[in-house]
Amino acid sequence: QSALTQAASVSGSPGQSITVSCTGTSSDVGGYNYVSWFQQHPGKAPKLIIYDVTNRPSGVSNRFSGSKSGNTASLTISGLQAEDEADYYCSSYTSSVSYVFGTGTKVTVL
Amino acid sequence: QLQLQESGPGLVKPSETLSLTCTVSGGSISSSTYYWGWIRQPPGKGLEWIGNIYYIGNTYYNPSLKSRVTMSLDTSRNQFSLKLSSVTAADTAVYYCASHDATVVTPGDNWGQGNLVTVSS
């Protein structure tokens, strides 16, 4: 299974909104509403911030939101803050009864 | 609140078997509430799902690693483990253990801190 495709980097100024995209196929992203997003700060373990395309775990800021259209899922961060600077990974359940991660996007707050 | 902690050797020789254990506190691995899994991340690279195991022993593996992976549960110690055979330098990575609620379809909603394993002679 091939990794889901993400842009290598996205940047924005404090207060702005940015969108991170994640493109797969009909065998993963397009076939299931089981897309997750993870935030990873340097040297730390990933943290789940979105699951089932749009749901936020308890305690995650409502500035993070998810969506999906066809084979592409998106993570939007609104009101960008310095603490949002991190790597972001998408993940999807697949037809192989497994999970596949995205290539990762580095978000920079200018 | 579940807490997970990986343990195992930090250095493994090529062609040998990598063995890691994840100790769980704050919950029971015998509970139907959770799946238990492993994810790895080569230095400076992205995440790769290795597989997971359910409390009754059902296992699900990454198709690209399936021939070399074995996961198991040790209910007496509240631990679960990973074995990866015939390792090469490409298996050098930080290995994370993770859990997720059985009602949530995700690789992990609770992660350990990670254990760096280097494959080298």
Image (tube, rainbow, N blue to C red):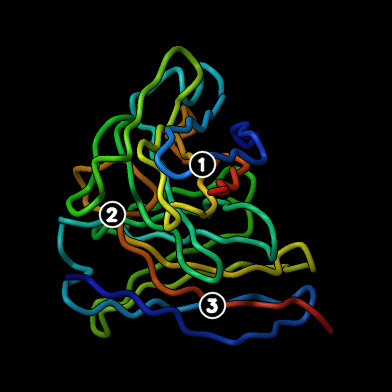
Please state, as top left, top right, bottom left or bottom right, where the N terminus of chain B lies in the image.
Answer: bottom left
Which amino acid type is shown beneath numbered disc 3? Asn
Residue visible at 43% across and 73% down in the picture: B81
Horizontal side of A35 relative to A105 (left or right) equals left
**Which residue corresponds to mark 2?**
B100
**Which residue corresponds to mark 3?**
B115
Q: Which of the 4 image quarters holds residue A66?
A: top left
Residues at marks 1 and 2, CA–CA distance in whole angstroms: 34 Å
Which amino acid type is shown beneath numbered disc 2? His
The first of marks 2 and 3 along the sequence is 2
Horizontal side of A43 relative to B111 (left or right) equals right
Residues at marks 3 and 1, CA–CA distance in whole angstroms: 34 Å
Mark 2 lies on a secondary structure that is: strand
**Which residue corresponds to mark 1?**
A13
Where is residue A79 shown, x and y percent of the image?
Answer: 35, 40
Where is residue B77 shown, x and y percent of the image?
Answer: 27, 85
Which amino acid type is shown beneath numbered disc 1? Ser
What label sits on residue A88 in the rendered view?
none
Give the number of the mark in front: 1 or 2.
1
Mark 3: few, some, or many residues within 10 Å (few <14, many ≥20)? some
Give the number of the mark in front: 3 or 1.
1
Chain at numbered mark 3 = B
